[in-house]
Every structure is written in C-alpha cells, then in structure tokens.
Image: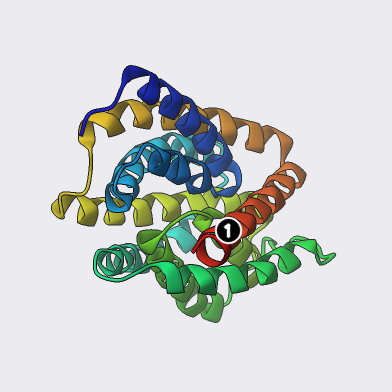
Amino acid sequence: MEFEIWVIAILFVVFFISGFVDSIAGGGGLINIPAFLLTGIDPEFALGTTKMSATIGKIASLINYAKNSLIDWRVSFVGVPAAIIGGALGTRAILFFDSVHIGRIIVFLLPLGVLAILLPRKDFGTKKELSALKLYLLTPAICLLLGFYDGFFGPGVGSFFIIALNLFVGLTLVQAAATTKVFNFTTAFSSFVVFAIAGKVLFLVGIPLAIASIIGNTLGSSLAIKIGSSFVKKILLFSLSLLFVTLVWKFFING
C-alpha cells in the first residue's frame, strides 16, 4: 500500500502529538488510529502499524521514567506476565471478532473512571509495604484485563492503567503514570508481535511514525516528571473525556 509524502508528513506530526499525550496520561491511540483510518487503510493494518510505532515510541518514555527512579519495579515484575498474555489474547480476538460490542462496554465504563479521578481524595501511594492481595492478585488481574483491552483496541489503556494502579494498588499518580509505561510497552509489544505474525503491519510506514512517537514520548514524559501529579491529573481527565466522546461517536452515533 503506497502513501503520498504529504500524507506521511501529516501522520508524522499526528504521531508526535499522540506520543506526547500517551507518555503523560495514555490515550494517544485516540489521535493516531482515527488519523490512520482517514487515509483509507484497512482497520486491522491501522491497528497493527500503530502498535509497531507506539511500541518503539514507548521505549523512550519508559527509559525517561526509569532514569528518574519513578517506576515501581516490584509491581512491574509481578504484572508483566499477565500483561503479555492479555495483550496477545486481545489481539487474537480482534483478528476474529467485531470490536463494536467491546467498544460499547468501554463507553459505559469510562464515566466510572472519570468519577474516580474527580472524587476528592489524597494520593494512595505511601512508603508502606504493599499487601499480598494488592501485589499478587489485584496487579496481575488489572494487567490481564487491561492488556486484553490494549490488544483488542487500545486507545485510553494508559489512562485506565494509571487509574487502576493509583486507586486499587496504591501508587501515587506520578508513580502510577511511570509504572504504567512498563505495562504499556509490554502489552503493545505482545500485540504487535501477533499483528506482525498475521501480516497486518506496514513496516515501511511504521518506521518514520515510530521516530515521531519517540520524540513525542521523550518530551511528554520529561514534562510530566518536572511538573508532577497535578499536571498528570489534568491531562488524564482530558484524555478520558476525549476517549469517551470519540467512542460514543464511533460505536453509538456513527455505528
């Protein structure tokens, strides 16, 4: 499939912006997947190629957070296996089933996520030890469920991870945003592998878009680290609101 140079240039800017947003609060797929679809590409190729560029871009964000010692590696190591399984299963599902029904379920769940952020509360993260329930049961369950969603569709999964890690596991918003990058990369990579095996990735198009994603992720994660939780929270609310409006349009109004 051939693309005009100007189309690639526009997509480059789009993927830079999506990488910037995704590195802070997730939801970058809300920007790049619709843009890809506007080029007339088959949805499966749009998802597969987006996974490729997003996976590479997330490495920059992950390294940035890791260098600043914000990632909770114990939570990460426990959750990664479940995230890998969830991402692979979700991608296999999208290759066989219609995503409309799952999209409608996500639409109904989104207001709960927004409510969780709007409710006045302190950050749950402290220096005390995590309970075995939160670490060995809730963390893998969250990673399996959200990993499946990321493989199946994806946009907004970073926002869901941040909310879940903060609300249920007990990380601060900044720690949750940082640790989310580990799971974002894991689920995206496992999803990308399945798409690639199925022949649903446009590698020549994905490479320049991956570069744009790297730049956006680097700048976004650096800004989030400097400004802190309040900025993450504002971007998170914006990302969730955008996700909600987009999915309502896709699965209810225009579906």
- What residue type is disc 1 on? Trp
Crowd rating for badge 1 (residues with CA inside 10 Å; few <14, some 14–19, many 20+): few
The colour scheme is rainbow
Residue 205 location in percent, x, y? Answer: 27, 31
Q: At 69% from the left edge and 33% from the top edge, which residue is drawn?
A: 226
* Outermost residue, right side: 120
Is residue 82 depicted above or below 177 in this figure? below
Q: Decide which of 157, 243 is in the foreground and name it.
A: 243
* Outermost residue, top side: 5
Residue 81 vs residue 78: left or right?
left
Residue 235 vs residue 207: left or right?
right
Residue 136 location in percent, x, y? Answer: 46, 76
Is residue 57 depicted above or below 42 in this figure? above
Q: At 36% from the left edge and 43% from the top edge, which residue is drawn?
A: 50
* Callout 1: SS: helix
Residue 184 location in percent, x, y? Answer: 44, 52
Q: At 63% from the left edge and 50% from the top edge, which residue is drawn?
A: 239
Instruction: Find disc 1 in the rendering and name its residue.
Output: 249
Is residue 152 depicted above or below 39 in this figure? below
Quadrant in the picture for residue 7: top left
Task: Evaluate whether residue 78 shows in this view.
Answer: no
The quarter of the image holding the N terminus is: top left
Q: Decide which of 20, 14 is in the foreground and name it.
A: 14
Residue 64 location in percent, x, y? Answer: 50, 34
Number of marks drawn? 1
Q: Decide which of 135, 140 is in the foreground and name it.
A: 140
Residue 151 vs residue 222: left or right?
left
Task: Evaluate whether residue 52 shows in this view.
Answer: yes
